[in-house]
Image: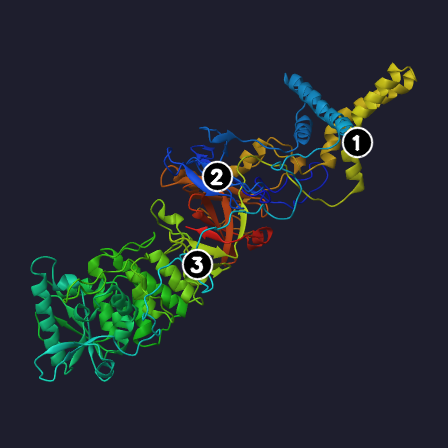
Amino acid sequence: MLPRDIRHLMTPLVDILFGVLRSNQTRFLILRHHGGTVRMLWLPFTHKDSEITCFDDIGRSRTHGPEQRYLSPTTGLCRQLIVQAVTPSGKFEVAIKNNTSEICKLAIWLLTHSPFKGWIIFEWIGKSVWLALKLFWPLIWFLVQLYFGSGDSGEDADSSYNTGYYRPYLRRFQGQLWAARSRTEHSLRLKEEPGMNTRTHACYPRVLMIRGSNRNEWFRCADRNTIIHAKYIAISYRASDIYTRGPCEKKEKAQFTDDVRAAVLGQQFDAYWLDLECLGETESEQNLDVYCMSDVYRRAETTLIMLGRADPGEDECWRSWGGRVWTFPEALLSSRLCYKFRDREEVKPLSLFQLANLAYTNSEDEQAIVNAYGNGKDPLERLERLALLKQAIWRRAMAGFPTLSGPPLLPRLDVVLGGGSVTGGGYKPHKAERVYALMGFFDHRIQPNHHEDELQALARLSMANDNDRITERMVSMFPSTSTPGASRRWYADNDIYHANLWDILPEIQVAGVTGNGALVLDGCRAAAIRWKDFPDVAFANTYLLTRTVVGYIPYFSWPFIVIGVGIVWMKIGRAGGIVFIVFGFILLLLSPALLLYGKSGRVIDRETVEGHLYGGTIANFPKILHLPTVYLTPSGSPFSTPEQLARRIGSDKQYEDAREQEKSGPGHMYTLVDTYSSTMYYFRAERPPTVCIFTGREGGLGRFIFCSENCKSNELHKEMVLRMPTEISQRMELCGWVALG
């Protein structure tokens, strides 16, 4: 269940007899489905023998076991998560319990059950006696407080006092940033070596292969004055089409180099750029070359695509070349293209549209990119263009080019740069190679680093180009297909609600990235989720003096009886004492109706909760109660199905769909009831979420991510994203930095 101010059950029950009340508080209730019932489940996430040291909101350390934990919003301490279940199973589950008014529930039962139906008379009498004792307790408590004085109820005691906000999430990110957005923040990332700084767009390559004056030799030139006056061809190829790892590798590379030089001379050029010969030998030189790689192809007069042998099939050669990570920067940023097969002498010119038909035949987004770059008549908005480029480059990581849904994977060696250096050590691919291939299309680039992974590099690239806010938009997305654990990262290639990156309007900012690749978020509105019980329902209604007075009358029944007994016992006036006693018993008999008139809207029982969780109605209560309806969401969860009616509500069919899908698939099915909007949601999650964060807007609704806590790494892990009314966020308090892993 969610924070203290996100109503766990439903819109408060109506004024039972005479009118309707409104609630100023809201809560969420999250339960897990299990077969035909609903249950909450605790799931371990580390080994039982391990111990974890974490820190509370003020930095105090605490050691505990590997069980799932949460940060208490009242004490700020890390506590073991105990969840409610309709059918408890295991020591980390408890039966559904609540702290709602027992007196009001007894009053409703007595009014809705006739004592003259069978043997219910005995139960009816028992509940009547219990209600009378409940009314007697305030008198005893008043006398005790009068004699001993009042005391505190405890720091973790729950109250129905309404602050107007959800209970806040108190834990903040307490570590150091691996890479920070602001230059004034300390960063643990390795600093670039001296001399690495360069402008975003280089005007010439760092190294070229240039034909010597005797016209028979080629030499590696790094002289700026020579390079800036040279017109050169940039060479593009795939390593697996040119050579194979093994004893013949050096010979095959030399043969390929001779083929390249012959083709360059055939095009009337005396200079070329080939990564086998021009990439640096030291790590700093390689980082600089990767940083300027896109500019090599921008400044080239022509880009020559060297394909494999055509005899096995030309289509296969094109598909092989088109599967490389760097194929898009090389093709799209070049001013002119031509190609050549290894076993043919002819060099043919090539348009970008011809290239798309030959090498990019399996994706609509690739065709859209080519149309935008090919003639400019079908331009794409900046963010849409960059998002499509990212999808296309990321697709190059695996054979067959499937769409990735989880965090980026390490690319294969044969889909990154062409190959290794002929001069020695060879090129060492970066773990974030695809990000560095993508950054050539951005206004601002980041210095490559062999020590960072793709999540860290992508976060740095997004921070460097703040107008695009790519990572902030990804935070609000949830992948439609994923492997267990992958969906709990902030990274998302697609969205379960079929939204695009440019559809998301973020409400947060990324302050930096941690060494684990987690995003540190600023400006979040967060709420702590409550699981242990149903607190008393705080509510508000239009003030009516009569209702207020009537609501207190039942509590005077016992004082009248006690006073009457005292009068009779002291022989002051027997008749007067009997009148007091009789009047007190009359008030006891009328107390159920009087209580419900004075305190209507506070009655919530277990049957009511379970009935609403199953999308049903409460048939065992008389219609005079006018219980409110909780509607299923029409578009807020993955299982949403709208009704084709005049009113915008969800279809009851989604409950059956959720029950059916509970039987298969990863994770577990949960139910969320939001009584702020009287809406119910079904969703699947790997672990029970304990924090709700508002991160953005899309399609007229807010994006709320439900997260579990990992106190060992001081991170939140995304479990699900729901689309809920944006106004809910105004009931959440702003929190400090949080790390989303």
* Along the line of sight, the residue nearer the viewer: 706 or 297: 297
Q: Earlier in the sequence, mark 1 or mark 3?
A: 3
Residue type at mark 1 is: Ile
Mark 3 → mark 2, Cα distance in angstroms: 26 Å
Q: Could you tell me if the residues under marks 1 and 2 are in contact, i.e. CB atoms within 8 Å?
A: no
For the point 25% across and 80% down, the residue is 224
At 11% from the left and 62% from the top, the residue drawn is 243
Q: Nearer the viewer, mark 1 or mark 3?
A: 3
The residue indicated by pointer 1 is 553
| Disc 1/disc 2 C-alpha distance (Å) | 50 Å
Q: Earlier in the sequence, mark 1 or mark 2?
A: 2
> Residue 245 location in percent, x, y?
12, 58
Tag 3: amino acid? Gly
| Distance between mark 1 and mark 3 Cα atoms | 60 Å
Q: Amino acid at mark 2?
A: Arg
Side (left or right) of 172 relative to 271: right
Q: Secondary structure at mark 3?
A: strand
Please tell me whether mark 2 sits on a helix, a strand or a loop: strand
Neighbor class of circle 1 (other Cα within 10 Å; few <14, some 14-19, many 20+) is some
The residue that mark 3 highlights is 512
**Circle 2 residue:** 62
Position in image of residue 69 (x %, y %) = 47, 39
For discs 3 and 2, the disc positioned in front in the rendered view:
2
